[in-house]
Image (cartoon, coloured by chain):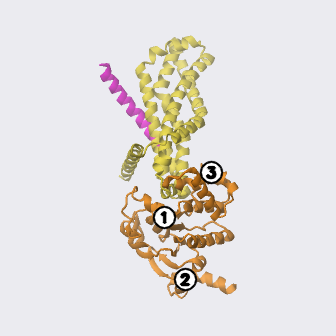
Chain colours: A orange, B yellow
Amino acid sequence: MIQFKNVVKRFGERTILKGISFEVKKGEILFILGTSGTGKSVSLKSLVGLLRPEEGEIYIDDQRVDQLTEEEYLPIRKKCGMVFQHPALFDSLSIYENIAFGLRRHYDLPEKEVKERVLRCSGLVNINAELLELLPQSISYGMQKRVSLARTLAVEPEILLFDEPTTGLDPITTNTVNELIFDLSRELKTTSLVVSHDMGCALNIADRIIVLDQGNVVDQGTPEQLRKSQVALTKDFLAEVLENESVN
Amino acid sequence: MKVLTNTLTEIGGLSVFVQELFSVAYRKGIKQKDVLDQLWKVFIQSFPTTAMAGFFVGGILTLQFTLQVKTFGALGFLGGLATSSTVREVGPLLIAFMLSGKIGAFTSAELGTMRVTEQIDAIRCLGADPLQEIILPRFLGIIFASFFLLVGGLFMSIFGGMLMGVLFSGINPEEYIRHIPTLVSKVSLINSVFKCFVFAFVLAAICTYKGYTASGGSKGVGIAVVSTSVQTMICLVFMDWFTSVISDAFFTVVGS
């Protein structure tokens, strides 16, 4: 289980997270929605120690993590796989080596097993084995996002964190990635936190949704509960989805 | 006041960064293969331009001195005079300026892009230390490569000076070389090699630091590249003065 308790994060004089609190249960898919600059990505990065909150507490499986040192964070990062907004692939490494990168750092595995895991994970996200020897810049952006997902899955994390996973993708690839998030979370029984702007997708695949505004949690609940929400920002997010549904 | 605060903050940040690099090297070790890869890449990429710059720096100084030595009927001292000023001062500084534009800008842009496209965060999330994984190999690779490039550039400047002297000043090669040992002492050579090492260190530290700490998207990368060039040049001039003072004081004490 993941818990945020009154987490505050500041950048200079700007306070991005103003004491947010929420929980994510084991095996749950939680979507964090909100407009740009409201602290969605900052929340994810605080969870894996890429950013350190000034106040508050963050727990993963009852272990407080916000005060851990960089060394102490290693087992936590092994547990949490993060898919970034950018594919964040290493340009000088082949796709195979990109997927194997975390495996080689987190585990001491024989090369045969590394290869097996790389092939299995690339298969999970529908990457053709012929592409594995190419460099990241020679494949499309959508495919790079898949490689990034495969790299995260290769370390077999218990918690998957997605930071705007469909940004910059066409609608078809967006649907594919969303389906992948749902299927992987169910098949691998991982806990998933997804930062997104996409209310339609959240309503389809999330178990719960929280809405952030100006660094505060302004709304939360199941997709059904949010459909009936009276919170202005949630209604704004819902408006477009409901309009599309009525057209269809 | 703000300029002073910013300058001190930059110096403090850079010092902590370099100290952290040494600490990582000591605690976690150095990836020797990656260092050699970087050294080779930087050296190969920059050798032609460095050699060319060195050649012309030496050549230009020789041509500039020709008029003066001819006035005093001392053309025989042309080689010694041109080589002395090239080796002691102008050569290392000009070649280091050129390297700061080439290696410094390239490295800070490369690392800055890795930072803003979250590759550095990804490295941390995947259980590796970006300082050990990508910064330290570049830092050490650039120091060694720049040092060899600077020393190589100095040899090219001596050769360039001699060739220009022969072609345009009417001096034969033996005559040009004869007075070099008279005017270029061992102390000058040691001082020059020491300068090359200090310049290489300054260049490597600033470009890796500015790239690693870049933020704010593509504009941030641009700012990192520009400030790498500006800060490196300012630091090189300062270190040029500082190393001259230090080595003069050292050799005065040792000499006495």
Q: Is residue B248 magenta?
A: yes
- The answer to which of B94 and A209 lies nearer the viewer is A209
Q: CA distance from mark 3 to mark 1?
A: 23 Å
- Tell me which segment is drawn in magenta: B231-256
Whole-percent x and y of residue A33?
Answer: 52, 75
Q: Mark 2 or 1 closer to N-term?
A: 1
Horizontally, residue B82 falls left or right of residue A20, namely right
Q: Label 2 vs label 1: CA separation?
A: 25 Å
Instruction: Determine which of the numbered discs, if any, sits on residue A94 in the image.
Output: 3
Numbered disc 1: secondary structure: strand
Q: Can you say which quadrant of the picture contains the C terminus of chain B?
A: top left
Amino acid on which the number 2 mark rests in the picture: Pro
Which chain does the residue under circle 2 lie in?
A
The main secondary structure of the magenta stretch is: helix
Q: Earlier in the sequence, mark 3 or mark 1?
A: 1
Q: Is residue A84 above or below residue B63?
A: below
Q: Are marks 2 and 1 in contact (CB under 8 Å)?
A: no
Label 2: state its secondary structure: helix
Amino acid type for the residue under numbered disc 1: Cys
What is the x, y in percent for residue A133?
Answer: 66, 51
Q: Mark 1 belongs to which subunit? A: A
Q: The disc numbered 3 marks a residue on which chain? A: A
> Which mark, residue A80?
1
Crowding near the residue tagged with mark 1, few <14, some 14–19, many ≥20 C-alpha atoms within 10 Å: many
Q: Nearer the viewer, mark 3 or mark 2?
A: 3
Residues at discs 3 and 1 in contact (Cβ within 8 Å) = no
